Image (spheres, grey):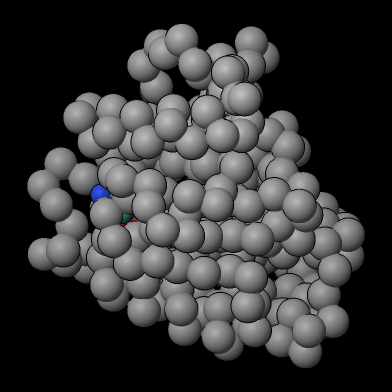
């Protein structure tokens, strides 16, 4: 990354830590950075992921931590789309990198659910350092959408699991969709065809966006 972009990341980080950030300035700074350098830029802004080995808490068959690329997250925010009034929920949220990014870019409340306690600790330390009170990580199994995560209306899955586990989450989301419209954004994760979940016809590469039908 060029020195100019590193300086922009450090400036952005300092603004965030002092509570002086705004979604529009965050977006403008991000878009000035060449697309290939945006992940590095974000890592300087948020502080790098404290990568730890995926531990015993990750159930067999679940996918270990791998951060979603900024390019895909930008498509999620723009195409879902995510606004300041939304509650964005990342099911399998790792160190909270995607959560913090979406919050900073949109102003949305962001809630993550993560099963690995070490990643939950890293996520909470990050938001405490950056002072982002509207970014929260819940420790638990994201195969059931419970507690604060039920407040969500935009759900994001970057392939945390598939098969039976995914089917269980989709059952919970179907129940929620009877109360209010939901958007479900899936990266690198094919979802089964379900009558209540309508896929946006336009494709965005590895990202598929679905809207619920049938809210009261
Ligand atoms: C591919 S990573 C995605 C991380 C994050 N969503 C992002 O985009 O940067 C998948 C994450 O899901 C978590 N995970 C896997 N199975 C889970 C489960 N049953 N409940 C909660 N989290 C889970 C993993 O620990 C890992 O952090």
Left or right of residue 24, residue 34 in this image? left
Whether residue 50 appears in this view of the structure is: no
Left or right of residue 164, residue 14 in this image? right
Percent x, y for residue 65?
33, 56
Whether residue 169 appears in this view of the structure is: yes
Q: Which residue is at a point 60% across and 42% down the rendered structure image?
A: 153
Percent x, y for residue 32?
85, 56
Looking at the image, which residue sits at the far front? 216
- Rendered position, 114 above or below 212: below
Q: Which residue is at a point 22% across and 68% down the rendered structure image?
A: 53
Q: Which residue is at a point 74% across and 80% down the rendered structure image?
A: 16
Q: Quadrant of residue 109?
A: bottom right
**Camera-side residue of 88 and 45:** 88
Percent x, y for residue 148?
47, 60
**Camera-side residue of 8 and 179:** 179
**Quarter of the figure with the N terminus:** bottom right
Q: Which residue is at a point 77% across and 48% down the rendered structure image?
A: 83
Count of numbered circles on the image: 0
Percent x, y for residue 81?
73, 37
Q: Quadrant of residue 139?
A: bottom left
Q: Quadrant of residue 169?
A: top left
**Quarter of the figure with the C terminus:** top right
């Amino acid at each position: 990354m060029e020195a100019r972009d590193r300086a922009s990341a450090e400036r952005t980080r300092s603004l965030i830590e002092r509570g002086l950030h705004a979604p529009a300035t965050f977006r403008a700074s991000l878009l000035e950075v060449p697309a290939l350098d945006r992940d590095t830029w974000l890592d300087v802004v948020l502080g790098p992921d404290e990568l730890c080995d995926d531990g015993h808490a990750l159930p067999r068959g679940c996918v270990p931590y791998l951060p979603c690329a900024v390019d895909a997250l930008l498509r999620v925010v723009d195409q879902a789309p995510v606004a300041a009034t939304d509650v964005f929920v990342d099911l399998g949220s790792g160190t909270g990198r995607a959560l913090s990014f979406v919050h900073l870019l949109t102003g949305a409340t962001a809630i993550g659910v993560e099963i690995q306690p070490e990643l939950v600790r890293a996520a909470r330390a990050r938001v405490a350092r950056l002072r982002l009170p509207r970014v929260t990580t819940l420790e638990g199994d994201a195969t059931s959408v419970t507690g604060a995560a039920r407040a969500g209306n935009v759900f994001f899955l970057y392939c945390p699991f598939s098969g039976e586990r995914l089917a269980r989450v989709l059952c919970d989301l179907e129940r929620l969709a009877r109360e209010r419209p939901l958007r479900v954004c899936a990266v690198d994760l094919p979802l089964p065809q379900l009558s209540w979940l309508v896929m946006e016809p336009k494709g965005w590469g590895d990202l598929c966006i679905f809207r619920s039908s049938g809210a009261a």
